[in-house]
Amino acid sequence: MPEIRSIPSSLSYLPADTTEPVFDISIGDALRKAASTWPNRLALVEGVAEKDARRRWTFTELLAESEKVARALLRRFAPGEHVAIWAANVPEWVLVEFGAALAGVTLVTVNPAYLGDELAFVLKQSRANGVIVQDVYRSRDLVGTVEAVRDTLPDLRHVIALSAWPEFIGGGDPAAPLPDVTAADVAQIQYTSGTTGRPKGARLTHRNLANNGRIYARTIGAGDSDIWINPMPMFHTAGCGLCTLGALQTGGAQVLPPGYDPELMLRLFEEERGTMTICVPTMLIRMLDSADIGKRDLSSWRLVTLGGAPVPPELVRRALERGVKVAIGFGQTEASPYLTHTLPDDPHPNWISTVGRPLPQTEIKIVDPKTGEILPRGEIGEICARGYSIMKDYFDDPDATRAAIDAEGWLHTGDLGSLDEHGYCRVQGRHRDLIIRGGENIYPREIEDLLYTHPAILGASVVGIPDRDWGEVPVAFIQLKPGHAASGEDLMEFCRQRLASYKVPRVWRFVEQFPQTASGKIQKFVLRDLHLAENSTSS
């Protein structure tokens, strides 16, 4: 890690905590180590509704099946080639992840909700040589969609449908040797969430992903008695990285539901004696609001870790009242993904409003976005990070890479935040979401956290729109809880009693649901464009 000059403790910089090691290990070697350490322990469960229909794998079986996948891939692809997977959360996804890692093939992860043009963009930009595809997703013919765009993809040689899984596995040579794969090799190309437009392909190495998953799991106290219920999309770093690789390296079992459903989640917690989950705030809200929550024995559920979107303190309080401990993380795809995290039973008196301290082996600083100078503790600036987890680059996009990672190796996250006197980070939102009204800075996160305390509000998002007199003004988009009512006037008065006048939105929009990325982040640019388009039309 590059040296940094001595920096006074009064400034917003934290050096890397080196108490937890970084291993030069590939994902495949991590799987082999798990199979050696916990050979007969349960590793993976297919989390379908019918308990008797759930397939199960021990660590030994998981390794054996993954090696079959690796050899099947090597019959069609060379190490280093790019193979995409376009599927929802099914156990085969996990087997492909580990099989690709063992084969030295770079896995390109694709959102199954994509339509044809979005799919074509990712497959073409990544130069995918093959794609493994689920036949049908939400009544959509995914194989047919691939075939419809195939003529635009000159690099694509093989399309492998999951319905042909036995034939695919049977095509491998059981005697074929597996290649040497190093920690520095690129394991995955993960596409960014797309909150501002076209996603970019972050190239993440085995070292990035394996270490981040293990360090996250150890930070939250995960162990070999834990049962992880994983609702996070596997094509995102939280699903295939934090949960899959975190459970793998601490001996826990992963239960993988086919998609997010709050009632199924609660059922899995009860029937599989789940102990923990990682999810985005909206997922936890829906579980806590479910009518089933009082009907289930959830005594085994001890921990939920939240991230991927701002975490309202009121939501944390609700979980704690249920007897479930909470920890909060912050990061982004480019960081594999986590940079900071709170602890279960965190000692910080106000941890609930933070995203914790930097994870081990990660440096954090807060800088002035204009000058790059490190700011005093408590001041808000851009969060920058440096360490083992930072991506190699954006695939085939050197300009975007240079804009994201500076010459000293610092990732500029684009998020605004601060460090307090305890070294805990607070996030105020994306730099581009900052609202400047008449020279006053307004941080949407502050308004959103307040709105989540209103009993009628299920979701809230505040965006800035141009204003002739003030430059920008805040507009609040609100999703009400079923059976609840509130008007813009009601909510304006609620805010007036708790916020400075200039922060109070004067415009209130009510929505049935929010446009979101697959990782649960609200796409504020869509809300902003919608509002501007409708007002332009009406005028």
Image: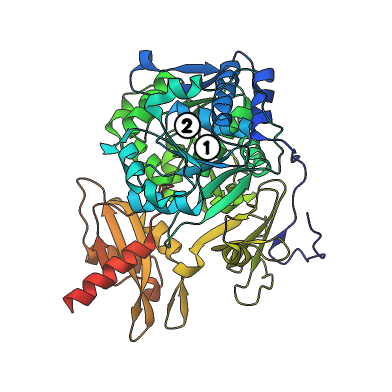
Q: Where is residue 28 in the image (x, y as percent from the top left)?
A: 65, 30
238 vs 14, nearest the viewer: 238
Which circle marks residue 93 in the picture? 2
Q: In this view, does 308 lie above or below 28?
A: below
Q: Mark 1 points at which residue?
A: 240
Q: Where is residue 115 in the image (x, y as percent from the top left)?
A: 33, 49
Q: Which residue is drawn at 60% across and 51% down?
A: 335
Q: How crowded is mark 1: few (under 14 residues within 10 Å), some or many (20 or more)?
A: many
Q: Which residue is drawn at 17% across and 75% down?
A: 538
**Considering the image in quadrants, where does the N terminus appear?**
bottom right
Q: What residue type is disc 2 on?
A: Trp
Q: Residue at x 60, y 18 (%)?
A: 174
Whether residue 61 is visible, yes or no, is yes
Tell me where residue 53 sits by quadrant: top left
Q: Is residue 534 above or below residue 166?
A: below
495 vs 263, nearest the viewer: 263
Question: At numbered mark 2, what does the secondary structure look like: helix, strand or loop?
Answer: helix
From the viewer's perspective, tell me whether residue 296 is left or right of residue 169: left
Which circle marks residue 75 in the picture? none
427 vs 491, nearest the viewer: 427
Tell me where residue 121 sits by quadrant: bottom left
Q: Where is residue 443 in the image (x, y as percent from the top left)?
A: 46, 67
Q: Where is residue 47 in the image (x, y as percent from the top left)?
A: 41, 24
